[in-house]
Every structure is written in structure tokens, then in C-alpha cells.
Amino acid sequence: MLPILTVTLNPALDITTGVDRLLPQQKLRCSAPRRDPGGGGINVSRAIAELGGTSRAFVAVGGATGAQMRELLADSGFAAEFWPLPGDTRFSLTVMEEETGLHYRFVLPGPSMPPGEDKRLLARLGEMIAAEPGYVVGSGSIPPGLPDSFYADLARMTRERGGKFIIDTHGPALKAATEARPYLVRLNHLEAQELLGGDADVAAHTLARALVRQGLAEIAIVTLGERGAIVASHDEEFELVPPRVTVRSSVGAGDSFVAALTLGLARQWPLREAARFAVAAAAAAVTSEATELCKRSDVERNYRAIGGTMLAPA
């Protein structure tokens, strides 16, 4: 299996609680909170561990919240290297409304990075990638103070050191990253449309194909929620549809998708099988409560249901 490195620069301590009903200007009695280490790359590493794989996680943390993150990640099943933040790691609050089954997410901004921190971060990440070139996953937002081009710089550096960069972010950081032609980009239909512009009704197949043809990625995957995903590369294009499941929460589906996809690729599975594994993981994640990620048994069952055959790890 090839090495996997996940990068989380703006993590969040995810706090989940519940109330019978959300009402304005009233004191609401909440259930006992659950705390999980969160952030795109952290979640990807957590899901990879659940699926029986290994990865390294590079995580920026700081302050008292960061200390809680370290404790929660102590028995995570993967190795983590922590980069000191100048302020407190942010937290996010998810409130489940029991009467409706709806959830409400409140996400705070992260602490601002000091000037020149991007150069120091890239230098350390460059050392880690050069030591074990493989798959590098840039997932989640970048904190205030870092340039929008950070993931683009990381994509170029990963390629120069013999690795393959996978990007899963949004907004200006996503646009900048695709200009550096990463190995693979994962984005939803709306993000693909915003990135390429044009008519709002353009089909996902067309968008995925355009991303590759315009040189914005070697592989483009446009996810469609319950309708699955469109995968395009220079050599092939296909659609994968997940099995029908009961949706409890969409939180963590994207990270579970990227985790299974990256693990399949690192095991040197064909792209179609890695993508099928990813769709199965996303479908498993939405059946979990709140901020829980996919469960291995559910992923394997879904994978078989959509025509996949479990392959031996490489």
C-alpha cells in the first residue's frame, strides 16, 4: 500500500448535542454533548483507520481546544503530527432537533495564521512528502492568514516530490488548487458549476469531463448526494449510483467518500473500484448519527450491493 498523508490546517472540535425543538429566545435544555475531533483531513484519516487502512495526519492545533483535540486523537488509529497554532483551535456546534430529525450546524472561524506561516508549513510538509511519497489529501478550509494559493503550492510540491495530490475544498482555495492541476479533485455539482461558470443547468457528466479536458485535474469526481457520483479521467468516464439507505445525517459523507477513495487508490485498485468503494462509504456515513463517519461493515455491505468485489490490500 502506498503512503497516505492528510493535511488539516483549520480543524474543529465538533460538539454535538440535541434538543426536543429549537425555539427562539428561550433557554433550551440540551442532551449530554458528544465531542469528536473534526476537520476534513482528520475525518479522512479517521475513516481510513475504520476501513482498515493506515495514514499519517498533519494537524494544526492550538490552545485549550487544541489540547482536547490531541487527547481525542491519542487513540485514533493513525499517527498524527501537530503544528502549533497561534490561537485556540476553533470548535463547531451541531444541534439535533429531535422532533424533526433536522440538524443545525454552527461553525466558528479558525485563528489567524501569522505572516510567513505558509512558507514554514510547506517546508515541513515537503520534508514529509519527500520521505514517503504517496497520496497527499488536502481537505477542508484553510485558516485566515494563509493565502488562497496554499493548496495550489502544496499540489505542485507534491507532484515535484513524486506524490499525487487529492483536493477537497471550496471557494477561492479550490479554484487556485485546480490551476495547479492536482491529481484528483472531488467536488459537488454546485461547486463544479461555480468553478467552471456558465449555465446553471449543465449536467454533472459535462462538468466532470470539462474539468479534465481543461487541465484542471487528471481525475475529476463530481458527487451528487443520493444520486452517487460522476467520475472522469482522460481514459474513462462512468457514473456510480449508491444503494438506497435511510439518511440520518449528511455530516461526514464527503470525508468518508474521500477516505475510501484514497485508500482504494493507495491499495492500487483500479479507479472504478476505488470510486465504487467511495460511493459505498458515503452511503454508509449518511446512515450514522450526527458527526459519526462510515462504519466498515456498512461500507463493505454497500460495496457489494453496487457490484464491488473486495480486493486484497496491496
Image (spheres, rainbow, N blue to C red):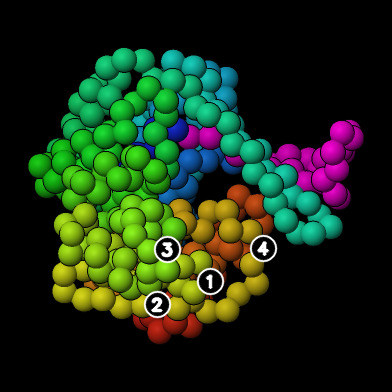
Residue extent of the magenta highlight? 11-34
Which residue carries the number 1 mark?
226
User: Observer-nearest residue: 68 or 256?
Assistant: 256
Whether residue 33 is in magenta: the answer is: yes
Q: Nearer the viewer, mark 4 or mark 1?
A: 1
Question: Could you tell me which secondary element the residue under label 2 belongs to?
Answer: strand
Residue density around tag 3, few if under 14, some if 14–19, many if 20 or more, within 10 Å: few
Reading the chain from its start, which is encountered first: label 4 or label 1? Answer: 1
Question: Could you tell me which secondary element the residue under label 3 belongs to?
Answer: loop
The dot on residue 240 is 2
Q: Amino acid at mark 4?
A: Arg
Which quarter of the figure has residue 238? bottom left
User: Observer-nearest residue: 92 or 147?
Assistant: 147
Q: Main secondary structure of the magenta part?
A: loop
Q: CA distance from mark 3 to mark 2?
A: 22 Å
Judge whether 69 appears above or below 115 on screen.
below
Judge whether 303 appears above or below 2 on screen.
below
Q: Amino acid at mark 2?
A: Leu
Residue 98 visible (yes or no): yes
Q: CA distance from mark 1 to mark 3?
A: 20 Å
Reading the chain from its start, which is encountered first: label 3 or label 4? Answer: 3
Reading the chain from its start, which is encountered first: label 3 or label 2? Answer: 3
Reading the chain from its start, which is encountered first: label 4 or label 2? Answer: 2
Residue 263 visible (yes or no): no
Question: Which quadrant would the C terminus be assigned to in this image?
Answer: bottom left
x, y percent for residue 86? 44, 15
